[in-house]
Image: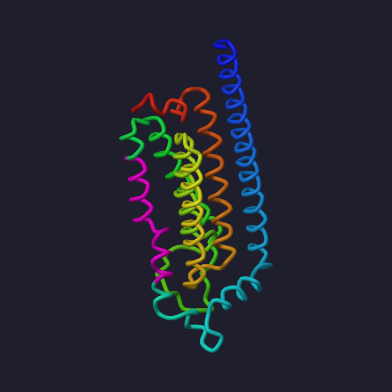
């Protein structure tokens, strides 16, 4: 009887390991698809924008968020406009720096020192990439409607959309790589995606970006986050970054 129970226990462990391996391999495949799709999507968008092929749909989508009788007035009452400013602030430099420092502090307190070092390189690296691309493309800001938020830099890709995607999604993939519970993994990722979408939509609503600017920021940011996930996964397998399996060992 004891031998049977031991065999059954070993069998359950084996099935659990196979299920975990299958989940990891599926996630890795998904990240590869996001990475390749994001790069392809950004290149296609950049080409279409450079040739002016997106101007017509950009204008229609931008004006669809304005009062048809008065294009200077965004749709909705004043509190909706204020809400749009609140959402766009979630992609501002100050907020993203605070979020990044908060996540870095969490990793340090959790004694995930190598994961913290990885985060301190991954997030600023994505922000630097966003800045360089904006300088390279130098697309003018929309001039159809007044800007409801101050804009200092070029339009393509949207810095707020890309930096929020880089920051929220990259931090999310780093946190879920060291988080053993599946429901917490899902919660962190859904929250990061929701914040990224709200920031991007608010930029178009406030008239400071063309829709294709935001879409390009999302695709580039998602591709960067997927790349960070794959790199961290590779480093975890080499023992260079802490993994979820040794979560309890650091507490």
Q: Specify whether residue 154 is painted magenta.
A: no
176 lies above or below 4: below
Given residues 186 and 160, the one toward you in this image is: 186
Apparent side of residue 202 relative to residue 7 in the rendered image (left or right):
left
Q: Position of residue 57 (x, y in %)?
A: 65, 72
Given residues 87 and 124, the one toward you in this image is: 87
Given residues 229 and 175, the one toward you in this image is: 175
Residue 246, quarter of the rendered image? top left
Q: Position of residue 95 (x, y in %)?
A: 35, 56
77 lies above or below 45: below
Apparent side of residue 85 relative to residue 63 in the rendered image (left or right):
left
Residue found at x 53% / y 25%: 237
151 lies above or below 72: above
Residue found at x 39% / y 59%: 92
Apparent side of residue 37 relative to residue 248 in the rendered image (left or right):
right
13 lies above or below 131: above
Residue found at x 51% / y 23%: 238
Specify the segment rendered in magenta.
83-105
Give the dominant element type of the magenta stretch: helix, strand or loop. helix
Q: Specify whether residue 85 is painted magenta.
A: yes
Number of numbered discs visible in the structure rendering = 0
Q: Position of residue 124 (x, y in %)?
A: 42, 45
Q: Coloured how? A: rainbow
Q: Position of residue 145 (x, y in %)?
A: 50, 79
**Placement of the C terminus among the 4 image quadrants:** top left
Camera sees residue 131: no
Camera sees residue 146: yes
Residue found at x 33% / y 51%: 98
**Placement of the N terminus among the 4 image quadrants:** top right
**Farthest front residue?**
1
């Amino acid at each position: 009887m004891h031998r049977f129970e031991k065999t059954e226990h070993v069998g359950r462990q084996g099935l659990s390991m196979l299920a975990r391996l299958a989940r990891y391999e599926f996630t890795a495949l998904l990240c590869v698809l996001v990475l390749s799709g994001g790069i392809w999507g950004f290149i296609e968008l950049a080409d279409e924008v450079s040739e002016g092929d997106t101007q017509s749909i950009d204008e229609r989508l931008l004006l669809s968020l304005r009062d048809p009788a008065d294009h200077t007035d965004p749709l909705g009452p004043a509190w909706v406009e204020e809400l749009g400013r609140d959402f766009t602030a979630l992609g501002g430099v100050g907020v993203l720096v605070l979020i990044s420092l908060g996540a870095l502090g969490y990793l340090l307190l959790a004694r995930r020192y190598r994961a913290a070092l990885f985060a301190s390189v991954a997030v600023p690296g994505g922000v630097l990439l966003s800045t360089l691309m904006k300088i390279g493309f130098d697309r003018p800001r929309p001039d159809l409607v007044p800007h409801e938020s101050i804009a200092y830099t070029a339009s393509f890709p949207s810095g707020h959309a890309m930096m929020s995607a880089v920051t929220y999604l990259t931090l999310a993939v780093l946190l879920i790589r060291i988080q053993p519970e599946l429901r917490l993994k899902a919660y962190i990722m859904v929250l990061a995606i929701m914040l990224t979408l709200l920031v991007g939509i608010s930029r178009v609503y406030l008239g400071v970006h063309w829709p294709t600017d935001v879409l390009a920021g999302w695709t580039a940011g998602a591709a960067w986050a997927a790349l960070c996930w794959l790199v961290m996964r590779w480093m975890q397998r080499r023992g260079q970054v802490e993994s979820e399996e040794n979560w309890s060992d650091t507490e």
